[in-house]
Amino acid sequence: MKRLSFMICALAVLGAPAQADWTAMDPARGFGEGAVGCMDGGENFKCLALRCKDGQTSLALIVTGGDFGQGEEIPVYLRVDGSPTVRLNMTPLVVSGTLEAEIAYDPIAHGALVADLMRGSVVSVSAWESDLSLTAASGISLRGSSQALSHAQSVCPVSVASATPNTDSERFVAMFEARGGDQAEELARNLLASDIQELGSDADLTAALLPISDVRSLLVAQLGYSTSIYGISGFGVYVFALEGENARLVFPGVGTVVWADLENLTEGWPDLWLQSVRGADPAFNIWRWTDDTYVRIGEAR
């Protein structure tokens, strides 16, 4: 199986660079396939890409006109707009004509970074130098990155996770098996009142509540049955984030099983792993709490 790699092509830049939109990579150029965004400085350029190459899916750094120095690992720092700086420890490779380094892509560890790249404006990149204010002028535009990175995720194979809901039932809580009982159903009926009214007297509702803290909970509800509304599965699935008196719909879908990953929390909210009930061994979609809602950060098997 291929490993999904995220390539950071960081090349020494001379003069005032011209920014380029993100686009699909051309495999004929020898850098693999996926998505790439570049800053062109003439003979030298800096590119950031999500790619698959030589059977691998990984985060990688490619440099010309520079020197990695000595060491078994290279610290690479990235910052999207004003978000916190992310450090990736990459392993250098020997490649004719360029300097390259890579780190295996992990959807849990790196998925939030990719999500930031898809919705950000500029990413600053530096090898060794953690103070990205020194490289702010040479940031890479993220214009077009959402579509390009979505393309990369579709052409590159899914990463294999070290643990999944199939292998670790203590870490991953099946949301529909969480407690809540009558309270969960009453909350769901209030939040989905218009949907229930549309279904009429035949509406079939199940709900469960997972407490996260004294004031936070996740509510999951399944509502059906209607193939005209929810497609072949017949059921809609809704996840709400509850905090105090506030309830926010953070995931609407159909025919989906939901787990909460209790080992990976962001601002106190667990990652959500979702799997379609259709197909043979479908991949898990991983969603992470970002900017007061949940955002899909990748897939895993």
Image (cartoon, helix red, strand yellow):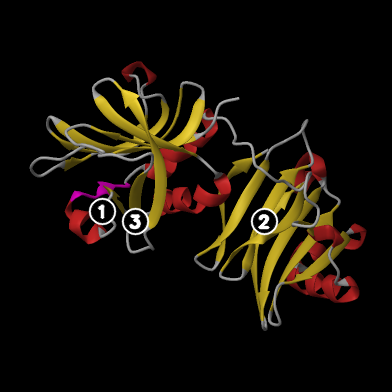
Residue at 59%, 36% in the rendered image: 159
Q: In the figure, is residue 185 to the left or right of 220?
A: right
SS of the residue under disc 3:
strand
The C terminus lies in which quarter of the figure?
Answer: top right
Q: Is residue 6 at all visible to an observer of this figure?
A: no
Q: Which marked residue is nearer to the observer: mark 3 or mark 1?
A: 1
Does the magenta-highlighted stretch encompass residue 140?
A: yes
Q: Which marked residue is nearer to the observer: mark 3 or mark 2?
A: 3
Q: Residue 106 carries which label?
A: none
Q: What residue type is labelled 1?
A: Glu
- Magenta segment: 138-142
Mark 1 lies on residue: 129
Q: Is residue 27 at all visible to an observer of this figure?
A: yes
Q: Residues within 10 Å of mark 3 (few under 14, many from 20)?
A: many
Quarter of the figure with residue 247: bottom right
Mark 2 lies on residue: 272
Q: Do the residues labelled 2 and 1 touch (CB within 8 Å)?
A: no
Q: What residue type is labelled 3?
A: Arg
First in sequence, mark 2 or 1: give its number: 1
